[in-house]
Image (cartoon, grey):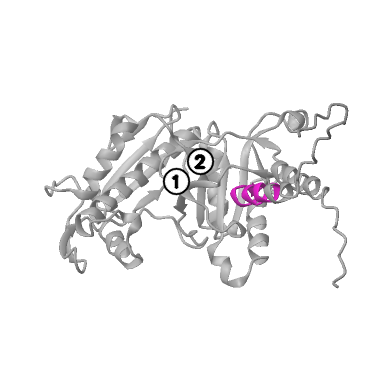
Amino acid sequence: MAKIRRNEKREMPALNTSSLPDIIFMLLFFFMSVTSMKEVTYKVQFQNPQATELTKLEKKSLVRYIYVGTPTAEFRKQYGAETRIQLDDAFAEKSDIGEYIINERSSMKEQDQGLMTVSIKADKETRMGIIADIKQELRRAYALKISYAATQRTSY
Amino acid sequence: MAKKVPQINASSMADISFLLLIFFLVTTSMDVNQGLARRLPAPIPPDQKIEDTDINKRNLMVVKINSANQLMVQGQLTDIKQLRKQVKEFVLNVDDNAYMPKLFEEDFGEPIGVQKYTKEHVISVQNDVDTQYQAYLDVQNELVAAYNELRDECARKYFHKGYNELEEDQQKQIQKLYPQKISEAEPKNYGGN
């Protein structure tokens, strides 16, 4: 005989969330593997130029970056709107590049020193004068492997 | 009878992992670092004078970019879209043109065999101080693209595979056939500001 219970309060069963951490961890690991740490905080702003024949930079530990662009809004008052060079976290002069490269190279393992790559991240509007100067400095410091950072061109 | 272990309350685990996830989302960036890989020439020792190395005129292709980002190839105003084709023609020199690089015959090993190639060709890129970086990179890109296309065509012809899928020593063979010779002039200030 069926008994109809009306007045008894029906409670919602607790949702089993024990697998939620696993799911989130999976997401976490996914993001950890596909993204890369930000190298520095940018003090210059730049928009990468476009190209098609790109190669990926292997081994992040062997890559050093030189940023070239106009100072961001907060630094414009202090440094003007002229194109500037940024090394690591600070503005730098052309003459600082040689020393920077030599310091960075000596901090690497000896067998890796010859494999150091310098990635030039410059704004596409930059004039070649400053780039040529940087290249000369790099040559003098024997950092001959360089890479012009660019994004994939999708259309001409 | 085994003692029952009290269950650990793991409900905050999700919160902790969420926190980690958000931390990583904020501190990392998605963009991959890629770029046009080039090699700079070794520096000239200070005691050595810069001398113009004597390159036979027919072996030299001069690409100049002026301050208005216009392109001049072998003395003629050219569009960037034509550059790749011109470079390929120049490097190949199929019909032994007297104005294009001299051909040398050499054995490149199996399966390429004896081939004629332009051993001494040089492509010289010269730019103005006021040239835009994008224009300069476009030219570099086209030059590299021309070489990549030549190498890929060669790989498909002899190895029936793309250049990137070849073994290292096979790639070396092709590199010897099409050596990448892009020279960049010592920076000078060219006219036309």
- Mark 2 in CB contact with mark 1 (< 8 angstroms): yes
- Label 2: chain letter: A
User: Which amino acid is tagged 2?
Assistant: Ala
Q: How crowded is mark 1: few (under 14 residues within 10 Å), some or many (20 or more)?
A: many
Question: Compared with residue B55, is residue A16 higher up or lower down, i.e. above or below?
Answer: above
Residue at 16% in and 61% down: B115
Secondary structure category for the residue under label 1: loop
Quarter of the rendering containing residue A85: top right
User: Which amino acid is tagged 1?
Assistant: Leu
In the rendered structure, the answer to whether residue B40 lies left or right of residue B116 reads right
- Label 1: chain letter: A
Q: How crowded is mark 2: few (under 14 residues within 10 Å), some or many (20 or more)?
A: many
Q: Identify the residue position indicated by label 2 in the image.
A: A150
In the rendered structure, the answer to whether residue A45 lies left or right of residue B183 reads right
Residue at 68% in and 61% down: A103
Evaluate whether label 2 is on the same chain as label 1. yes
Secondary structure category for the residue under label 2: loop
Q: Main secondary structure of the magenta part?
A: helix
Measure the C-alpha gap from mark 2 to mark 1: 8 Å
Q: Identify the residue position indicated by label 1 in the image.
A: A54
Report x, y in % for residue B90: 23, 45
